[in-house]
Image: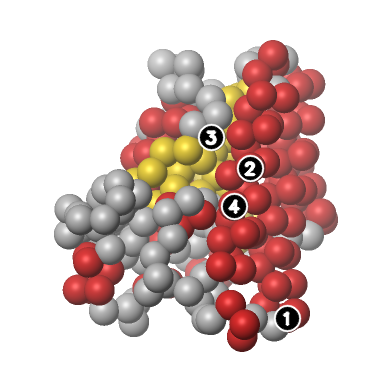
Amino acid sequence: MTTQQKTIIVTGASQGIGASVVRSFLDRGYNVVANSRNISQAGPFQASERLALVDGDIGTPATAARIVEVAIQRFGGIDGLVNNAGIFIVKPFIDYTSEDLNALVHTNLEGYLYITQLVIRQMLAQKRGGSITSISSVLTRNPHASLTCAVPMFTKGGIDAASLNLAAEYAHAGIRVNVVAPGAVDTPLHANTPKDFMKSLAPLNTISSPEEIAEAVLYLTEAKNVTGEILRVDGGAHNGKW
């Protein structure tokens, strides 16, 4: 597959999974438009003529529009989107506040909605199909009693549901829509989480690296006959009790 002329957008790209996704696509020859609130100051990447950085809150329509504009002006179009931006708040269900809910909806759902709408509109205009891959969580369908995160999961579950519906809605245009659902991942988000506990969540007794999640994203982006898929990368955590 020739990827030299392909352009992909990655949100939440300054660290962890998002940064690994950016590096993986650059290594494959893609042009990449990478976004986070302060990505130009974070400095996670070496300068490249195939990389454009866009600062801004992905939960706002203005940021989404600016990302798409940069992709079109700098690289001539859009072939893929990786919706990686997200936040995670763990607490008992009865302790969640309206502020928690608003923050989760803003980043996890609005951060998916506005950019995905604009990307699909551009892909339809280009008439060459495309790929949209979003990062969800294995906990949307396989909860664990030790991880009390019901409210974040109904935002992540919304990503699952929207993606499956979009896969059906836009299959006629060759736009494929998929999800990667990680289990425990060794990212800055979990810097203070005990590693033994994280390993205990999977029968393989492993923790995924950001690079392993990026590999799954690459696969779904390039798998021409895969759409409407939720690919779980969780060391088997979804496979019942062990």
Please name whichever residue, 152 or 4, is drawn nearer the observer in this view of the structure: 152
Amino acid of disc 3: Asn
Instruction: Please identify the quadrant where the N terminus is shown.
Output: top left
Q: CA distance from mark 3 to mark 2?
A: 11 Å
Residue 53 position, x and y percent, is 59, 54
Residue at which label 3 appears: 178
Mark 1 lies on a secondary structure that is: helix
Mark 2 lies on a secondary structure that is: helix
Q: Residue at x 81, y 54 (%)?
A: 61
Amino acid of disc 4: Gly
Is the residue 223 above or below the residue 189 in the image? above
Q: Where residue 157 is drawn, which disc sits there?
A: 4
Amino acid of disc 1: Glu
Mark 3 lies on a secondary structure that is: strand
Q: CA distance from mark 4 to mark 1?
A: 19 Å
Dots 3 and 4: beta carbons under 8 Å?
no
Residue at which label 2 appears: 161
Residue at which label 1 appears: 99
